[in-house]
Image (cartoon, helix red, strand yellow):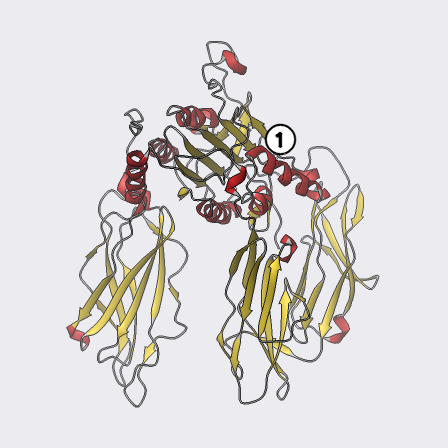
Amino acid sequence: MSMPSEVGGDNSEPRKPVLPQVLTEPEDLCVHLRDRAELTCVGIGHKPLMYEWLRNGKVIDSNKEAGKLMIPDVSIKHQGTYTCVIKNQFGKTHSREVTLNVNPEAVVRDYRSEGIDIILNPKTCTVEVGGSCLFSVEARCKYPLTYKWYKDHQTIGCEEKDLKMFNLQDHNMQGTYQCVVTCPNTKESVLSHPACLSIKSPPNHSKSEYRATDKVALLIGNYDYMNETTLKAPIHDVAKMAEAFRSLEFKVVSLLNLTKQEMNAAIHEYCNLLGKGVYGVFYFCGHGFEENGQCYFVPPDARSGYTIEDCISSNDVLRAMQKSDPALVTLILDICRIRNKIPSKPPSNTGCVTGRESPSVPDPKGNCVSIYATSEGMFAYEDHEHGILVKYLQKFIYQNKPVSYFFNDVIDAWKQDPQHCKLQKPEIRSTLLDWGRSLSDRILTKGYTQAYNTRKQMWLKAHDTPKPQEIRIPELGNLVLELTFQMEFSNVLHLFATIKNPGNTCRSIAFPYDWPKSISMMGDIKNVSDTSITRSASDTPKQRAITKSTFQDLQKLRDNLELKIVVKYCLADEMDKHFMTQKINLGLPLIANLHLYKRVTEPIEHIDES
């Protein structure tokens, strides 16, 4: 758990001297003997903040600048009640009291440890209200095994291999489930992979008289800033929102880290997908601010001391979306709404931008709902890996309720957390005349089939992944290498390199090399097969070697994506060697097809609905 930061601001302190406040409370914890325990408390207030931890009322760790208590090797003496005290020059405040329980019977090891071999892990499950879920785990061991299931690290009383849940009505059953498999003879335990349970309300289409001719969503998350604080939430929030809108039948375009020019081009291309009767959603997460009643989105390449001229205006986005007369326009703005650090010059025509008098404010069309993560003059915050807004949106967005109604549920849930209420207050604004329209309304293409199919082809063009390729290398005894591809976001592509047949090599693994400098690798190349392919004494391959490489910024490609593949291998009793293939042409994958690097000059051409 890490210190939350503002989405769209780099100063998390209140502006007036106040006592420190607890932002994130520590949580109860149950760990096994000799395991690692971590308690976290996060506060806000005037710096410097100092943290002090108490166990059973006695100080055990004091004068820390971070509210994290680490116990690397837990013993029975660590069991007890813990409290965190946060201090500054104005006083101190106490966190709630939490309990650390220690299980003395077993040592939980990583699932890859020796002894117990888990051969089937539970799988993530999504069900509708009233549905059923089955989590299963299979393990092998020479001795009898026992099983115990946990939800969000708390035991739930099931001690069978299969965890069965029927008629799921309560959304509190959602969470992360894992099973601890124990061998009583050796007192060793193994923890399964985590699996998530999601419960979504089924769309009850009979209750809604409204239909969409199509549904499209543009989601943009900026986090890798040149002259601003790097953010954690956007990449996770865009992924979570993309998953939600896909389940609601939206054609989703999800993009990360776009420059101002690329954002303009992406919005331009996205608006080409809108049309009469279409539901359109625009979601932005990143740094932002508000001036004269208008929100601005900061691109990652914004200069130091940026002003509104360096940013994208929410009103410009709304105006572009409304040109084709969609049935529903929903803006979800997950940004701060404080004033910019450097005030911009007011427009020369009126001296200020106010209401309808300004040409920059779109005329109301009676089709728009705007959802703000926070209110005017307030910050928006990250909470762990997600923004606070998305934490609540994902619980209610699936409901078959009018947009404004489901957002009321978001606010009601928000009120239950006093810390979140203090930090930021969400807001909704609506000019929607057809107030009953819902994001879960069905798509009805009758009378609009041609436009729907045209729109589908346009969307598919921006989400075309390279076809799988098989490469045979005679120099290595006809070693067979397979390349497959998978989309993560509309401008992020996974490349999997698999050694299908090792040829005459004893050990081999493959990975990409020499790709265009305009794109970059997200993270490191990962070996997702645990071990590279090897040969046993019987000359039979034991396991296929697979690497995963993730390429980002595909919108910057000006020419086809060409790269080489390096095969690292060794023959019997020899050192590792490398073989490099010729350049492989993967074309223009995903959003690269749209050439977003080009400056937008032509008007938006909407699909002919006739």
User: Which quadrant holds residue 270?
Assistant: top left
Q: Provide the residue designation for mark 1.
A: 375
Instruction: Tell me which residue sits at (15%, 73%) in the image.
Output: 474
Residue beneath the point at 49% across and 32% down: 330
Residue sticking out furthest to the left: 474
Residue 354 appears in the rendering: no
Residue 335, picture quadrant: top right
Residue 216: image location, x then y, percent: 40, 38
Q: Secondary structure at mark 1?
A: loop
Viewer-side residue, 125 vs 376: 125
Query: From what the image shows, is residue 400 above or below residue 503?
Result: above
Note whether 481 is above or below 284 in the view shown.
below
In the rendered structure, which amino acid carries the disc numbered 1?
Answer: Ser
Where's the C terminus, which quadrant?
top left
Mark 1 residue crowding within 10 angstroms, few (<14) / some (14–19) / many (20+) = some
Residue 190, image x, y percentages: 57, 76
Horizontally, residue 564 falls left or right of residue 302, namely: left
Could one spot residue 503 in this view of the protein?
Answer: yes
Asked whether, in this view, residue 35 is left or right of residue 390, the answer is right
In the rendered view, would you say 99 is above or below 91? below
Q: Number of marks in the image?
A: 1
Image x and y of residue 279, in percent: 43, 34
Q: Is residue 307 above or below residue 579?
A: above
Which residue is outermost to the top? 349
Residue 261's x, y, as percent? 35, 32
Where the N terminus falls, by quadrant?
bottom right
In this view, which residue lies farthest toward the front?
206
Of 343 and 338, nearer the camera is 338
